[in-house]
Image (spheres, rainbow, N blue to C red):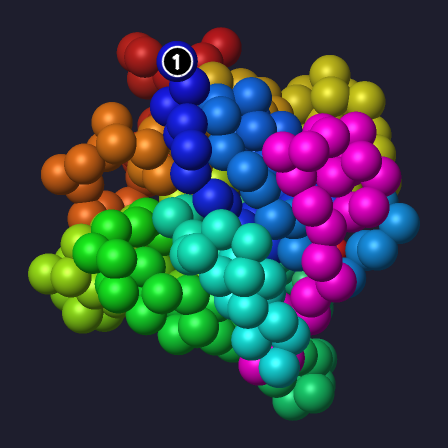
């Protein structure tokens, strides 16, 4: 028996990396998945590989009209939707003083606007049936600051905040909303130069307790848990999937620190 048997799920940014891992895992667990992304070729290829249990729809998550089409598709085919994973996101690097307003606005439009529109469009369909689960992919950058990612951090803090509001507004109508906070994950976003994992880990992950990047599937499994009935009493929570990155910091040279 799958953890999502008979459920209908929408995964944004589902054409590659973390979103694709989520779509694959959800199908393996019994769901029918609508993969929504701007990457048409990759999205279509993945949906085809997953067979009858998946379909692809072009969606720019920052555009409201596209969301209406996604909602109509789910309602027409299945009479509703059970799970939404707001995973699509973009990252633009740059010091705060060098970040253009246009770049800030685009990052907010996709990362915050996409999550907002997804919930605004799909939650009423879920609430009408009195059940549903929404997983918003934030980041550890939605829990702390870091240099060079001002626009991105602002967007991911906003996703975390929106999740709390939605948990309050939708929870009493049967829809749970939680956020996932990945650390560094080996994807085109997390490892843009495609460096070998061992090199990346040695260079950037010595200070992370588990001393390595995460894999897309490790985040997908966290989303599966929150989307499934295993998390039936979890609402408004934030789940870090970061190898302990946000647990704290080491005092170098003192007992317990890595050598
Ligand atoms: N990789 C990491 O280290 C990391 C860490 C923390 C959080 N995250 C978050 O996880 C999520 C997935 O990231 P990833 O690492 O798989 O990145 P990725 O860049 O590999 O994939 C992102 C996906 O989102 C899609 N997308 C981008 N803009 C879109 C839009 N306007 N409409 C629809 N789809 C759009 C892309 O086409 C792509 O398929 C993102 O929200 C990201 O911010 C990633």
Q: Name the residue under label 1.
A: 1
In this rendering, is residue 47 above or below 154? above
Count of all numbered marks drawn on residues in the image: 1
For the N terminus, the quadrant is top left
Q: What x and y, as percent, mark residue 219?
A: 50, 32
Residue drawn at x 49%, y 61% is 75
Q: Is 46 covered by the magenta stretch?
A: yes
Q: What x and y, as percent, mark residue 18?
A: 62, 38
Residue drawn at x 21%, y 64% is 170
Left or right, 213 with respect to 162, comes to right
In this rendering, is residue 56 above or below 65? above
Residue drawn at x 42%, y 38% is 7
Where on the picture, by quarter, is residue 226? top left
Write the start and end of the magenta stretch as one range.
43-64
Left or right, 80 with respect to 42, comes to left
Left or right, 245 with respect to 73, comes to left
- Residue 59 in sight from this viewpoint: yes
Name the residue nearer the viewer: 22 or 69.
69
Q: What x and y, as percent, mark residue 9?
A: 49, 45
Q: Is 195 covered by the magenta stretch?
A: no
In this rendering, is residue 220 above or below 129? above
Left or right, 205 with respect to 31, comes to right
Q: What x and y, as percent, mark residue 32?
A: 55, 38
């Amino acid at each position: 028996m799958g953890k999502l048997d008979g459920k209908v799920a929408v995964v944004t940014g589902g054409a590659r990396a973390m979103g694709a891992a989520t779509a694959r895992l959800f199908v393996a667990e019994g769901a029918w998945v609508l993969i929504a992304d701007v990457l048409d070729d990759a999205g279509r290829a993945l949906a085809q590989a997953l067979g009858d249990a998946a379909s692809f729809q072009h969606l720019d998550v920052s555009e409201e009209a596209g969301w209406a089409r996604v909602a109509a598709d789910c309602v027409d085919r299945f009479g509703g939707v059970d799970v939404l994973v707001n995973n699509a996101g973009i990252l633009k690097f740059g010091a705060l003083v060098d970040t253009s307003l246009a770049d800030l606005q685009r990052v907010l439009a996709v990362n915050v606007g996409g999550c907002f529109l997804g919930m605004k469009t799909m939650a009423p369909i879920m609430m009408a049936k009195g059940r549903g689960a929404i997983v918003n992919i934030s980041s550890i950058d939605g829990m702390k600051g870091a240099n060079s990612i001002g626009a991105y951090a602002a967007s991911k803090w906003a996703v975390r905040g929106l999740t709390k509001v939605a948990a309050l507004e939708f929870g009493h109508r049967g829809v749970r909303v939680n956020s996932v906070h990945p650390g560094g994950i080996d994807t085109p976003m997390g490892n843009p130069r495609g460096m070998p994992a061992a090199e990346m880990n040695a260079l950037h992950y010595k200070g992370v307790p588990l001393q390595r990047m995460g894999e897309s599937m490790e985040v997908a499994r966290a989303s599966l848990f929150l989307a499934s009935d295993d998390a039936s009493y979890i609402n408004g929570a934030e789940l870090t999937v970061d190898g302990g990155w946000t647990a704290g910091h080491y005092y170098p040279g003192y007992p317990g620190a890595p050598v």
